[in-house]
Image (cartoon, rainbow, N blue to C red):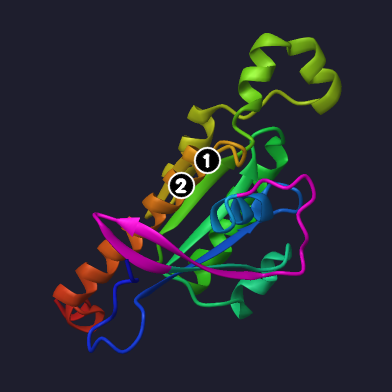
C-alpha cells in the first residue's frame, strides 16, 4: 500500500512531527522504536530525521519525524511541524517541570496553534516503584511522576494532550504516533474547511 498522495497526486502526503525534550528523557529511543521497530541499548544521536509511515483508517500516510537539539532556544530555528511531541521522563520530575516552564511555552511562542503531545517516557517505572519502592528510590532518588500530575500540566495549555509511553512496548509507541498523526490530519481537515484567514475574520 502506498502513502496517500496530496491533492494533485504528485507527492506523498507527509505528516511532519518534531520531537523535543531534555537530554536523556528518551526522545531518540521513541523515534528509533517507531521508525525502525527496534529498541537499541545505545541510541546514536547522529540521525536527526526519519521518514516512515503511519496507517490511519486504512490509509497510509508518510510520516517525517525530526528532533531538535536539547536547547529549547533552537525551537525557533528548528523544522516546521504539523505536531510537536514534548517528551519528559516519568522517572525525573525536573524534566516535567522543564516541559511546563520551557519547552511548551517556547513552542507556543513561535507556533501558537500547532497541536502538542506531552509524552511521559519510561512509564513502566511506575510499576517498578510500586513493587520495589526502596530499590527504586535508591537508584532514582525521586518518586515517579504520576499520570494525574502530568495531565494537569497538559491542561494548563491550549491544544496540549498527554499520553504515557514506554519505548520498549511497541503498542505504546505505535499508539503515540497514531494519535499524533490523527491530530495532524484533523487539523488539516479543519483548515481546509475554514482557512485561517477566513476564520480569523469571522
Residue at (37%, 55%) from the top-left corner?
159
Few, some or many residues within 10 Å of mark 2 (<14, 14–19, 20+): many
Q: In the displayed structure, would residue 78 be above or below residue 65?
A: below
State the residue position of label 1.
170
Q: CA–CA distance between discs 1 and 2?
A: 6 Å
Residue position marked by numbered label 2 in the rendering: 174
Give residue 202's position: percent from left, percent from top: 14, 76
Do the residues under discs 1 and 2 have CB atoms within 8 angstroms?
A: yes
| Foreground pick, 126 / 166 | 166
Residue 167 highlighted magenta (yes or no): no
* Residue 149: x %, y % from top left: 53, 31
Q: Work out whether 152 lies above or below 53.
A: above
Whether residue 115 is visible, yes or no, is: yes
* Residue under the image location 75 percent in, 26 percent down: 142
Magenta stretch, residue numbers = 38-62
Q: Residue at x 29, y 72 (%)?
A: 4
Amino acid at each position: 500500500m502506498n502513502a496517500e498522495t496530496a491533492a494533485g497526486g504528485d507527492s506523498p502526503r507527509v505528516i511532519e512531527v518534531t520531537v523535543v525534550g531534555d537530554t536523556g528523557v528518551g526522545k531518540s529511543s521513541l523515534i528509533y522504536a517507531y521508525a525502525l521497530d527496534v529498541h537499541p541499548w545505545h541510541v546514536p544521536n547522529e540521525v536527526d530525521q526519519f521518514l516512515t509511515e503511519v496507517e490511519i483508517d486504512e490509509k497510509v500516510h508518510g510520516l517525517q519525524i525530526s528532533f531538535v537539539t536539547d536547547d529549547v532556544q533552537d525551537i525557533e530555528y528548528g523544522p516546521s511541524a504539523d505536531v510537536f511531541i514534548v517528551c519528559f521522563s516519568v522517572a525525573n520530575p525536573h524534566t516535567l517541570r522543564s516541559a511546563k516552564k520551557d519547552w511548551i511555552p517556547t513552542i507556543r511562542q513561535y507556533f501558537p496553534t500547532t497541536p502538542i503531545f506531552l509524552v511521559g517516557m519510561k512509564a513502566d517505572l511506575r510499576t517498578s516503584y510500586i513493587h520495589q519502592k526502596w530499590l527504586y528510590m535508591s537508584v532514582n532518588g525521586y518518586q515517579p511522576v504520576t499520570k494525574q500530575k502530568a495531565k494537569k500540566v497538559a491542561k494548563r495549555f491550549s491544544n496540549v494532550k498527554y499520553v504515557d509511553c514506554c519505548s520498549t512496548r511497541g503498542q505504546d509507541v505505535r499508539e503515540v504516533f497514531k494519535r499524533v498523526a490523527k491530530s495532524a490530519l484533523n487539523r488539516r481537515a479543519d483548515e481546509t474547511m475554514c482557512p485561517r484567514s477566513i476564520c480569523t475574520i469571522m
